[in-house]
Image (cartoon, rainbow, N blue to C red):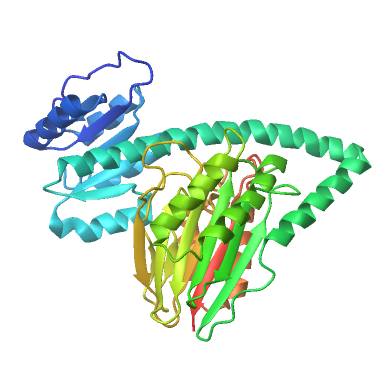
Amino acid sequence: MVADTLIHRSIPHRPTVLIVDDEDIVLSSLRTLLQLDTDYNVITFRSPTEALSAIQRQSIDAVISDFLMPELSGLQFLAEVKKLYPTVPRILLTGYADKGNAIKAINEIGLYQYIEKPWENEHIKMVLRNGIQNKTLEETLQQKLKELDESIRSFDALANREGILRQELSLAQQVQRNLLPKSFPLVEGFRFAATFRPALEIGGDFYDLQTLPDGRIGIIVADATGHGIQAALSTALLKFAFATTIDSGKPITEIAAAMSDILLKGLPENIYVAGLLAILDTESCKVQIVNAGLPHPILIRTQGQGIERVPVNGLFMGVDLPGAVSPGECAEITLKPGERLLLYTDGVSESAAADGSQFDDGAMAEHLATALGITVDDMVELLADTAIRYRDDGQEPDDITIVAIEVV
């Protein structure tokens, strides 16, 4: 099969979108839409193998792939793309009958989104825009995180030599621990569990649970840029933002947007927060979720029924970008007796082995499948231990936070 002509970049930072589909009409329609209505460079291929060969020579910022194709299926193709470009948003085009496979892709290969044919032009542009913005932010944050980690390690080495700094760090650690809840809400029919493992003496992760006036439970799990002093100080602002907005009675998307506004005004420059906000209705067992950059939550069904991800996406909090958190995307699930919902930071999912495979690539689901028979408290501690052991010695450590909800 012959690939369409490559449209080469003329502007260094102009995003490049790869589209792969074995139907010319689909390629033509999407290419025309994006060339007329966006400033993206567009690369199109009918052959997934030719597309893989091309992107080893030219970087991309987003990829749209058909599900049913010769040579490779859309799932196989996007799995290969993930190996080359882990942060690139991967979008699957499916027919209505393939919806189940699209959900499988979200669980197995970290699919960013799936779009059913026939698509809406505005929707596909919005998904691309949000995905590319999220990729850019993630790459910027990774670089900032690396720079901050180097600074923190310098401070940590100094602390080993200077007792007074060690005392200051110990005090900061105590203050940060005091920001976390000392106990969980006591609600008949529910159990809550959590663990917090900072990478250094103090970290940038945070979680909290609050009982609201109407009896619902508000939950926040968050990860501020970095792992050290600056990130730890940011958790104090997170505590304030959560406490002052969660019981407002407003829809969860508006609560998330209000938190983001507080963080935008109060956080230091170049410090952002990946956060997940949830509200549990203890009467109906329904959970509303707004995700601002954390890994997809995991729903552990009753024994033998499997493990699912809750595919809800969003941009980081405290970011001055159009569409960041506000209005946000909200997912709602209903928990049944015996089921557990896991909310966690990327210190768990992105623990990487020596071969580059991440804990979230399959080992995490396998571990959870074997942990169904233990208590929810033991499960979160064992999951954190396993993620740390999975991490290669050469990988920079990251904070780990896990919060679990169980219906009993």
Q: Residue at x 73, y 61 (%)?
A: 178
Picture mark count: 0
Specify whether residue 71 is in view: no
Establish if 101 lies above or below 15: below
**Residue visible at 15% across and 45% down?**
120
Q: Position of residue 185 (x, y in %)?
A: 59, 76
Which residue extends farthest top? 10
> Is 258 left or right of 395, judged from the image as shown?
left
Residue 14 location (% of width, % of height): 33, 22
Residue at image coords 66%, 51%: 236
> Residue pushed farthest left?
25
> On screen, 209 above or below 360?
below
Is residue 284 at least partly visible in the picture?
A: yes
Q: Residue 263 placed where, x, y %?
A: 55, 45
Q: Quadrant of the N terminus?
A: top left
Q: Which residue is found at the position 24% from the left and 46% from the top?
A: 92
Which quarter of the figure has residue 103?
bottom left
In the image: residue 32, left or right of residue 110: left
Left or right, 38 with respect to 165, comes to: left
Q: Position of residue 43 (x, y in %)?
A: 23, 26
In screen coordinates, is 36 left or right of 294?
left
From the viewer's perspective, is residue 31 above or below residue 342?
above
Vertical position of residue 87 compared to residue 206: above or below: above
Outermost residue to the bottom:
188
